[in-house]
Each structure stands twice: as structure tokens, then as C-alpha cells.
Image (tube, rainbow, N blue to C red):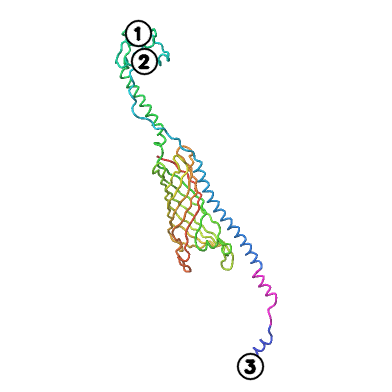
Amino acid sequence: MNRFNQWYKSKIESHPEDPPEKVWDSIQDELDVDQVWHRLEANLEGRKRKKALLVFSMAASLALLIAIGSIFYFTREPQPEIATLDTSPPAEPETPESRMPGQPADESIAKKLQPIEGVLALSEKKHPSSEEIRGAMVESTGLTLPSLEAPESKATGPLPAEIISRDSFSKEIAQKTLIAEILEPQTKRKEFFIGATGQLANTWMLNQKTIQGLNPEELTHTNLSFGKNFGILAGTRINERMILQGEFFFLSQKRQSYNEYLGGQFVSSNLELDYSTLTLLFKYQIAENSPHYLAGGIYGSSLKNAVQKIESELTDVRNEYNSLDYGLVAGYEYQFPIAGNWNLGAGLFFRYGLKNIFSGNEMIPDYLNRTQNAAFNASFSLNYAIF
């Protein structure tokens, strides 16, 4: 047996044989090193361009929001002021003096006679006689006047009390009617409304991986991701310029997309979370009777589905994410009156989650991959004022 082993060993060692060159060429073709580096360079260049596009889009959105707010603030027209009406009861009209038959209606004579002391003295009497008036006027002006005697049946006295009261009542009614017309738009303002709303959201899952993927030097690349929100709304007016509004979204999508190396391959990876979301907003009217509103509030979300998609392969990862999320909301909205009690709203909102939605898995604990939801939302709504 030992002799056989020695013989076998000598045969093996005395006939060394190198692998054929074709084998090494085949292995090199399989590795395809040159093409791999070309692909890496192309991906890095593309990531740099996408990074610049991302920064530009975020800066443009912020600049647009600031510009719209500035234009509306500095160019809005001042509201006309309504003069204060004197609602005090009208003064009781003075009883006119008895008019003389045939008295000329010349205004110059009336103005000339007004400051005459004799007439003023006579006016203090309740019912001066015609002869007394005539004597005072002739003495003061030197005019020759016809006889002031008039039949007793044509003598005029003070206006009847019912005529005076009727005149006062008419003026008071006219003032109240004018006040009602001025205040009518405010008294008829609707205090409660309902409607539907939808949003196109640029969503972000803020964690270490997402932030590192924005660096073009990293192999993992973070892509722009978008989701949709659909729901209903209802609200009420708290005061002249403040509105409380609630929104319930049946579907609220959160998305985050990456390009990364997994298993030695450069693949597309997508994380897709679906929520039901309840939002509470306080909307403040920038100016009286203005269509511009600033909004702020809070939201709470309940997780419905969570899927990790790598190329075309789907994996349920709901057990890796918390079932609840909550955070803050802030933004701007413009209300377009359409017809009757219908209004169309359009606005820009930002949502930021305060809770770590990652609950951990077998490989990574939750505190090493802290993840928060964030989104820029373009919002549209249609509401109807009920009462």
C-alpha cells in the first residue's frame, strides 16, 4: 500500500499541467471588469446630475412659495373704510313761520331778511301777527310790501305733529336699511363647509441611508420619490379670520427610492408605505375678505401596508415599521370662489414626522436606523359651504 501511494504521488508531481488559457479568458469575460467600471462611472455621473436637480427643485419650490407670499402681501389692495353712521334719532324739525300771501320767493330777499333783528325778535313769539311782520320788514328794508292780511282760513300754523313724527320715522327707517345693506355680507357668511381633497406629494424617509445617498461620492443613490393622497374635509369658521379644518385621507402614500449594490449587483430598491391619515389645521386669513390663508396644524397616521420592492421582487416588511406616525403640518392656501357656495382651494404644504417609524429587525435595531417621514405636498380641494 505504501508503494502504491508513493507511485501515485510521483506520477502527480512529475506531470504538472497548467489550465488552458481559454479557461482564464472565460473567467475574465464573466467578471467583465472593464464594463463594470464603465457602468460605475456612468452611474456616478448620473447621480451627480440628479443631486443637482434635487437641490435645484427644492430651492425653486421654497423660492416660489416665498415669492407668492410676498407678492400677495405687498400688492393687496387696502380695504375701503365704511363711514360711521349716526344712528341717533333725528332732531325734531323747527316749526316754519307763517308764509305771507304773495311773498316773493327771491332767494336774495330771503337771505337779506334772515339776519334782521326785528324779524328775529318777532320769531321768538309763538304766533306773530301779519301786521307785526310787515312793519318790521318795511322798517328794516324800506321795501313796500302788499298787505299781509290773509283770510283766517288760509293762515298757516305749525306743522301737524303726525307729519313731524312720520318724517322722523322715515329717516330712521332709511338709516336702518342702509346699515342692514352694509352688514348683509357678514351676516350671510357661511360658517360650516365640507368637501374633498387630493395631494401630489414629494415624499422622503429621512434616515442615514437616505442622507448618505444624496452624496455623489457614495455608491448608494437616493432618488426623488412621489406619492398620492386622497380624502375628505370638513371645517368651520371660528371668527372673522380663523378657520378650523379637519382632513381624513383614506390613502396617504409614503415612498422612497434608491439605487444601490445588493448581492454584487447595482439594483433599484423601493420602500412603499401606505397610511390612513387624520389632519387638524388652523387656517388664518392674511387680510379681511382676502382669499389667502396661512395654515398650521398636526397629523396622525395609521400604517396599512409596507412593502420593500427590489427590481420586481416584493417583500412584506410591515413588521419592521411602527403602526403609528405623527407630526406637524404647515403651508399656504388660496381659495377661488367658483359659483354660489362652491370654492376651489390650491396650496403648498410641508409635513414633518416626529416619530421614528422604523421598529427594527433581526439585523438592525431601531435606534441605528432612525427614520422619519417628510413630504412637500401640492394640495387641491373642492368644498361647499352649508350654513
Q: Is residue 25 magenta?
A: yes
Q: Which mark is residue 198?
A: none
In the rendered image, the quadrant that contains the C terminus is: top left
Which residue is labeled 2 in the image?
116
Mark 2 vs mark 1, CA separation in Å: 18 Å
| Depth order, front residue of 380/118 | 118
Residue 43 in the image, given as x and y percentages of width and height: 61, 62
The amino acid sitting under disc 2 is Ile
Q: What stretch of residues is rendered in magenta?
A: 17-33
Q: Which residue is mark 3?
A: 3
Extreme left residue here?
126
Q: Tell me: 201 left or right of 158.
A: right
Nearer the N terminus, badge 3 or badge 2? 3
Vertical comparison of 235 with 149: above or below:
below
Residue occupying image coordinates x 56% and y 58%: 223
Q: Nearer the viewer, mark 3 or mark 1?
A: 1
Image disc number at residue 148: 1
Q: Residue furthest right?
A: 21
Hey, what amino acid is under mark 3? Arg
Q: Nearer the viewer, residue 15 or 379?
A: 379
- Quadrant placement of the N terminus: bottom right
User: Is disc 3 placed on a helix, strand or loop?
Assistant: helix
